[in-house]
Image (spheres, helix red, strand yellow):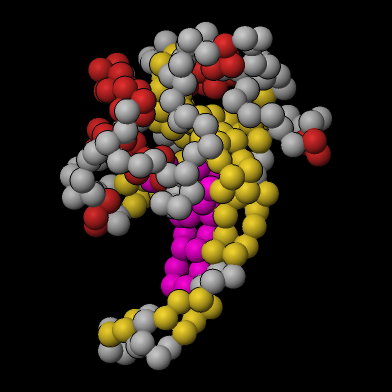
Amino acid sequence: MPTLLMRLVGPLQSWGTASRFDERDTQLEPSKSGVLGLLCAALGRDRAEPVDDLARLRMGVRVDREGALMRDYQTATGVLVAATAKPDLNRTVVSPRFYLSDAGFLVGLEGGDLALLEQLNAALRAPRWPLALGRKAFVPSKPVWLSSRCADDGPFGGLHPGALETALREQPRIAKCRIEHRNDLVRLVIEHAEAGALRHDQPIAPFAERRFGPRFVQPGVLEHVPEPAEA
């Protein structure tokens, strides 16, 4: 079963799954809703269009470089008042925002429809709309798509012929780890159909409706990840 590989590297990333009210959180790895939103931007798919075909893909993440969790102090005005459901232009609230600094992730999406994966891979190379890493202001510092023509991108490029776990294991590093993590094992987070930790980031309706269901993910580690090939 083929797997689409994506490189998510940038100065700032934010992958919130449980944000409520004034606080905006982030997971330590990309969320499925955020990754599928990025693919919708590449395709030029409107927020009101269905995403069932993308939601059926099984996602895995390899953390090549752990991001530093940061907190940003922000304020907001004109927030809604619960009693009236109207904005209060005289009210200012503190709205802390959390994000990851200098993270690097290899994301894999496994699916049986090779034509869909080829379409997504082509769209990442020539996106209809700008791509972002969780928030519109957080742009990638390297191309999201992988090309087999570049030595650092490995032999397969963006489409790996193998299953998700195999693709994440065989693809060379897409980012160097931090010095403090140089002796650590490389973390994996793999979607599982029946067991694992719950993440509430599975799209169950068009993004305009903002409806997300649960999915299971299982943690894992890799003792060895291939280093980038010499150009």
Q: Is residue 33 above or below residue 9?
A: below
Is residue 68 shown left or right of residue 34?
A: right
Q: Is residue 111 magenta?
A: no
Is residue 112 shown left or right of residue 106?
A: left
Q: Residue at x 54, y 54 (%)?
A: 26
Q: Residue at x 21, y 45 (%)?
A: 46
Q: Is residue 120 above or below residue 191?
A: above
Range covered by the magenta-colored residues: 13-33
Q: Is residue 20 magenta?
A: yes
The foreground one among 221 and 133 is 133
Q: Is residue 83 above or below residue 16?
A: below
The spot of residue 70 in percent (x, y) is: 64, 57
The spot of residue 167 in percent (x, y) is: 51, 17
The foreground one among 33 and 154 is 154
Dominant SS type (magenta): loop
The spot of residue 213 in percent (x, y) is: 35, 50
The spot of residue 147 in percent (x, y) is: 46, 16
The quadrant of the rendering that contains the C terminus is top right
Q: Is residue 28 visible?
A: no
Q: Residue at x 38, y 14 (%)?
A: 1
